[in-house]
Image: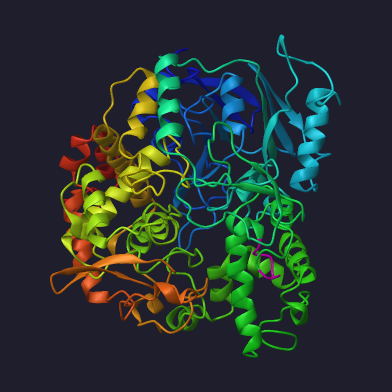
Amino acid sequence: MAGGYTGKILRVNLTNRSVSTIDTAQYEEYGGGHGIGSAIFWDLAVAPGGWDLQDGLDPRNVLIIMTSPLSGTLAPGTSRTNIQGIGPQGYPINWYTRSGLGGTFSGMLKQAGWDGVVVEGKADSPVWINIVNDQVTIEDASGLWGLDTYQAQEKIWQHVTGNRLFSEWIEAGGASTTMAPAIACCGPAGEAMVRIASVIHGAGSGAGQGGFGAVFGSKNLKAISAMGTGSVEVDDPAALLDARTWFVGRYPTSGGGRPPYMGVAAVPPNMATSRKKGCMSCPAPCRGNNDSGVNNDSTCVSGGMWGAPRGGAPHDFGQRYGVNGFESYGIFAYLKKLYDRGLAGPGTAIDTAPLPMEIYGTNGFAEAFLKTLCAREGIGNDMAEGIMNAAEKWGRLEEDTDSGLLNSPQWGYTCHWTLPGIEWPYGSLLDGRDHDEHAFAFTFTKIINGMDQQLTPEEVVNILAEKTIPYIGDPFMFDYGDFYSESKVKLVAWHRHYTRFWKQSILYCDWVFPDLINADTSDNKGFTPEAEPKFFNAVTGNNMTFADGMEIGRKIWNLDRAIMILQGRHRDMEKFSPYMHKPQDPTVPPNRNTLVAAIEVPYYRDGKWSYTSHSYTDPTKAFEPLQPLYIDKDKFEDWRTMFYEFEGWETSSGWPTRSTLEGLDLGFVADELASKGKLAS
């Protein structure tokens, strides 16, 4: 099938072990990835009724794994796989959410002839799904259960290839290949249904947020393996090649294989990098394969959040066990604070056994933590239920979210980037997880660190105001001296709509897209909004504009909102933890336990644009800080009312109106909400 789609989505019911197909064409209006996944989830999990959509570990949860039409093509930064369903990590409700991973899985699944995989039900014993082109079998995984993710993948490689991996041609579905299958699997954490369990692919690709490794485990599903010998047919190969040539010529990477957004090295400078590794189709590989063996194949928190100093512990602790590194850090850092205050430890109300808290900060502690977590032994059983549930059980939730001792801004996710980049906490609260989409955070980091000649703040805000279609012409969207303006409403809306379509559905890589400011071009302008539709149209044959994609993103955003409303979402629930409303000490160096992110941003004051800085490590960049840093509770409530009005949602409930939904061709969603008494009046 031309146009980037294979034309079919694999549907597997583990309860009765049946295999069928879904016609992709009926969902193409949503683009791909998350958009198609949400439409399928609605049809298979929401519309039939029968359950309350509360428990991510319920067998009725529908696990959806989707590619995009660009996956497996030359379109840069599109080798992403979106995973979605009810996420067991969310608190106080397991919100409908999504995660994603890079690598080769999406491309290989497309080459096998599938646009995605939908998994329903629960097997009566451990299984894995084996896809070889159009041949799909449900295999016995009893010999894989209990293995870590590396061991499980190696066993599956041997099974599928007959131990001839990379050594000779392998017969695969009537064709031949020397490739190994691409595998997404859970580790011991997923098997134990740890609520922060990841889905791991290869050595360093992981879908961490949401707890979808636990969903795998809840379904007795160890892995999904895909091997394909086909190709992905595009509508206009010449246009795609021209677009790729334009992209790498006009927007070169910043040396050393770093992605164009980065003004600093992708790996710590003390690690001798022997080569770079990237996802399929990536023009700027970001993963370090280092002579030291530390952090190989992973970036960011996957490489150094295991109790030892960042960059000092082997990354594969988390990858092998299948645990989200960032959320694990949030749990054991919180536990360490309690321990240091005498509130947790041997003989206290919060018994930390069998964790050796006295060796916190070592590799030995990191591995002990993971073993305890995955065995659900002692305190590991509390931690496996997530940081908020654990604090609630210990009777500390209210006190510690008020003081900030427990750094979870919203929904049970660990504090990540927050102020002054206000689109991050606002967007996360309005969504169902820490959205973890960097966009402007990387834009402003790049402005300061990545340019030989720093742009003035006026130049920056004018470039951004020119590029943020459809809300062009408003530089005050980027005034980070005001967190509560109507311009900030447009900024958050732009970010949510952009990411819902161009990132989550078309699956452009978050570490490359959007590119609004680029240090490697003569005019410092990035490839957004030109590149996104250029590649999409070359592959699909459509004539989509950037603004068209933004409108589809708004449609998906509202569809997701409706699913969460059916789960119980209401304005009254969308509240930050109390510590987010308290002034933060601007003299404390930023780290992962504070509200402040170390980025420089523009702000407007007394008729003048300036930069503000929270970079405490570089005295040459000590611009005037904005103080105090916190979210004013009353002003945020007023801002949220403006945001609801802007989106076409009822201000008292946060629920979309019928006119809003029907204007997005979501009349069937309005009907379902009305039938449940949850449509805005």
Query: In this view of the protein, can residue 233 be seen by the observer?
Result: yes
Is residue 300 highlighted in magenta? no
* Res. 340 image quadrant: bottom right
- Residue pictured at 54% horizontal, 34% vertical: 79
Extreme right residue here? 163
Query: In this view of the protein, can residue 643 be seen by the observer?
Result: no
Type of secondary structure dominating the magenta stretch:
loop
In the image, residue 61 lies at what x, y percent?
Answer: 53, 43
* Res. 183 image quadrant: top right
Q: Is residue 91 above or below residue 9?
A: below
The one nearer the camera, 335 or 508, is 508
- Residue pictured at 57% horizontal, 34% vertical: 119
Magenta-tinted stretch: 304-309
In the image, residue 584 lies at what x, y percent?
Answer: 39, 81
- Residue pictured at 58% horizontal, 50% vertical: 57
The one nearer the camera, 165 or 394, is 165
In the image, residue 52 lies at what x, y percent?
Answer: 44, 49
